[in-house]
Amino acid sequence: MEQFQHYIGGAFSEGTARFESRNPATGEVWAMMPEAQAEDVNAAVEAAHAAFRSPDWAGLSATARGKLLYRLADLIAENAEVLARLETRDTGKIIRETSAQVAYVAEYYRYYAGLADKIEGAHLPIDKPDMEVWLRREPVGVVAAIVPWNSQLFLSAVKIGPALAAGCTMVLKASEDGPAPMLEFARIFDRAGFPPGVLNVVTGFGSDCGAVLTSHPKVSHVAFTGGPGTARAVVRNSAENLASTSLELGGKSPFIVFADADLDSAVNAQVSGIFAATGQSCVAGSRLLVEHAIKDAFLERLKDKAEAVVIGPPDDMSTEVGPLCTRAQVDRAADLVARSVAMGARLVTGGQALDRAGTYFPPTIVDCTDTPDAPCLTEEVFGPVLSVQSFETEAEAVELANATEYGLASGVFTRDLTRAHRMVRAIDAGIVWINTYRAVSPIAPFGGHGLSGHGREGGLQAALDYTKVKSVWLRTSDDPIPDPFVMR
Ligand code: NDP
């Protein structure tokens, strides 16, 4: 049985309690994880707070912070295989994806390493002749970061990279489901040479240790990725302390295909959009909106692809769809599909948990054209379930696309350039992919609005969000200060 530890103040510890972690491919317990209690979380926040004030971190130049992040990126690249295998084992995410993703995670750290000494203040052309006024950008302080099980190494990189580049320190709570990759990441982080306490990694049950962390008076900012329900609890907790928040939440993203699209590309992108990562992706293109004239032909091709997907153990390079992370996810997907079919939606393929060991649910397509209230169309499934609607006109496509409280991602497939531009303006989402889907880069901001949250990860903006602006006023005149009863 493998054992994992917390990382607090630069030291590894067992934690006051422990819990079992299961391999989703087999259902077997394979490791013991530390379960953070209030005292562990408090120790982690104290360590981050001490590090934030310590000359070893606060006194480092931005360039020196960048060099540490470069070293971390190199270590991640060197240990990519170990990290990928652990993520696959503990979460069921297929090795094909974890291998590629961990290698790219190193690039996120490199991007923020290079950015560290480019987070600039400004000089203001102030409207008073005897004043110099400039802005300093200073780190916000201790950041509490919370991530869900899917893509934890990636979802934490888009928080740790910009926060540390900006000079913050952090306590990261890994998900209780599949925390192994983050606890192994902590071991790697420890070798990069950061002062103790700059990053602390704990795991445990959200409702207990997550609540203590997000309401802690020494936390200045909460960076959260998860579902909207939990986000509300997180915001309520952080309000105790009036901490700022950035929220990367779920989605119900439209994938729109016009009749003039390159259909080979569109079918492949839709497969990637909903079945990759076994659908456990916040940007999953989970609502197919297809122009009526090509609906039947498109669905036929999609069904063939969905049924040909290789379902298997996540650690096999040939597997395309692996298990869902937990039994609860399987039950949720099955329930949403069953309730939709009971309302009159047409099951095109899939729909029921696979009768084998592990938590497997097959690629599923449900035609909801005549059931606009079907729950698999309106609720985030977070599994390989695609709901389908059709449209006759561009205006109708826009109306259906925006008929959701989420606003994270969207995809448009068309060869008509002017229409593509109109769709970009009309779609209410943080990301619009045209003739592609599920593309990300450290250079491009990522995030949404509405039930999908607020704030952006990736790009320069993410680093700026971990800073606060200080206005500095310097009087350049040696004359006596004029009338003290008049505001200058
Ligand atoms: P949850 O919201 O249930 O959990 C997310 C994290 O919050 C977990 O670490 C969880 O801990 C923790 N948590 C739970 N309760 C609390 C609490 N009261 N206070 C503080 N933390 C708490 O999300 P899921 O695990 O179900 O993840 C799936 C969701 O994440 C989906 O909605 C998905 O769309 C979204 N997501 C968004 C992404 C984005 O970038 N926009 C990317 C990936 C996923 P524990 O695991 O211990 O319960």
Image: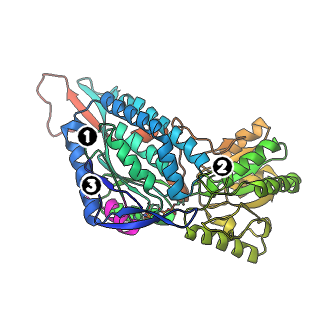
Percent across and percent down for residue 41 are: 29, 60
| Residue holding disc 1 | 195
Mark 3 or mark 2, which is nearer the start of the sequence? 3
Q: Is residue 175 above or below residue 430?
A: below
Report the span colored magenta.
Answer: 203-217
Q: Can you tell which of label 2 and label 3 is closer to the viewer?
A: 3
For this view, does 329 lie left or right of residue 294?
A: left
Residue 346 visible in image: yes
Q: How many marks?
A: 3
Which numbered dot is residue 45? 3
For this view, does 405 lie left or right of residue 191?
A: right
Percent across and percent down for residue 262 are: 81, 41
Residue in front for this viewpoint, 243 or 425: 243
How far is mark 2 from mark 1, CA to CA? 41 Å
Which secondary structure is most common in the magenta stretch? helix
Residue in front for this viewpoint, 447 or 23: 23
Which numbered dot is residue 410? 2
Question: In this view, which residue lies farthest toward the front?
Answer: 1
Give yes or no for contact between labels 1 and 3 (Cβ–Cβ under 8 Å). no
Residue type, numbered disc 1: Pro
For this view, does 232 lie left or right of residue 44?
A: right
Q: Residues within 10 Å of mark 3 (few under 14, many from 20)?
A: many
Q: Which quadrant of the figure has residue 118?
A: top left
How far is mark 2 from mark 3, CA to CA? 37 Å
- SS under mark 3: helix
Residue 466 visible in image: no
Q: Which quadrant of the figure has residue 198?
A: top left
Give yes or no for contact between labels 2 and 1 (Cβ–Cβ under 8 Å). no
- SS under mark 2: loop
Mark 3 or mark 1, which is nearer the start of the sequence? 3
Residue type, numbered disc 3: Val
Q: Can you tell which of label 1 and label 3 is closer to the viewer?
A: 1
